[in-house]
Amino acid sequence: MMQAKVKWLDNNTFVGRSGSGHAVVFDGNADNSTAPSPMEMVLMSAGACSSVDVISILHKARQKVQDCEVTLTSERADSVPRVFKKIHLHFDVTGQQLSETHVERAVKLSADKYCSVSIMLTGSVEVTHSFSVLSTE
């Protein structure tokens, strides 16, 4: 079982502590925020989760990955609750002699099988993926 706690600090700022002891600050202020909002954290969590999968799969395929960056774009509902309607993850994977087929497979496996965060969101959010392979040669 996974557990966490969130404690109010002041104004709309909170600190979350994971069961494993890690802390992260959240800020619900629209203006002058001091940390990411909870919705920004959800978006970044989808990117981090999927990136872990993509890198792991490419390393298992013995691909020479030197960098991986995912850019996330989203569309939210106009009215409350301002849930995500669409999220797009675009991966820029850089390395030597990277196989486009391997990168495509890694992104697809993350999207369809491994990334718990984005798969959980697909029940109510349109989640799409794309990628670019960049060579360092």
Image (spheres, rainbow, N blue to C red):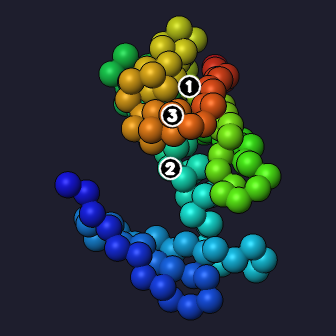
Secondary structure state at the residue bearing disc 1: strand
Which amino acid does the dot numbered 3 rest on? Gly
Mark 3–mark 1 Cα distance, whole angstroms, equals: 34 Å
In this rendering, does residue 30 appear at all?
yes
State whether residue 25 is above or below residue 133: below
> Label for residue 120?
none
Where residue 58 appears, x then y in whole percent? 42, 23
* Front disc: 3 or 1: 3
Q: Residue furthest top?
A: 101
Q: Residue furthest left?
A: 1
Label 2: which residue?
45
Q: Quadrant of the C terminus?
A: top right
Give me the residue at 64% from left, 74% from top. 28
Tell whether 43 sits left or right of 55.
right
Mark 2–mark 1 Cα distance, whole angstroms, equals: 24 Å
Number of numbered callouts drawn: 3
Disc with the residue nearer the chain's start (3 vs 1): 1
Where residue 4 appears, x then y in whole percent? 32, 67
Tell whether 105 sits left or right of 56.
right
State whether residue 48 is above or below residue 36: above
Callout 2 touching callout 3 (CB < 8 Å): no
Secondary structure state at the residue bearing disc 3: loop
Tell whether 101 sits left or right of 17.
right
Disc with the residue nearer the chain's start (2 vs 3): 2
Q: Quadrant of residue 26?
A: bottom right
Label 1: which residue?
95
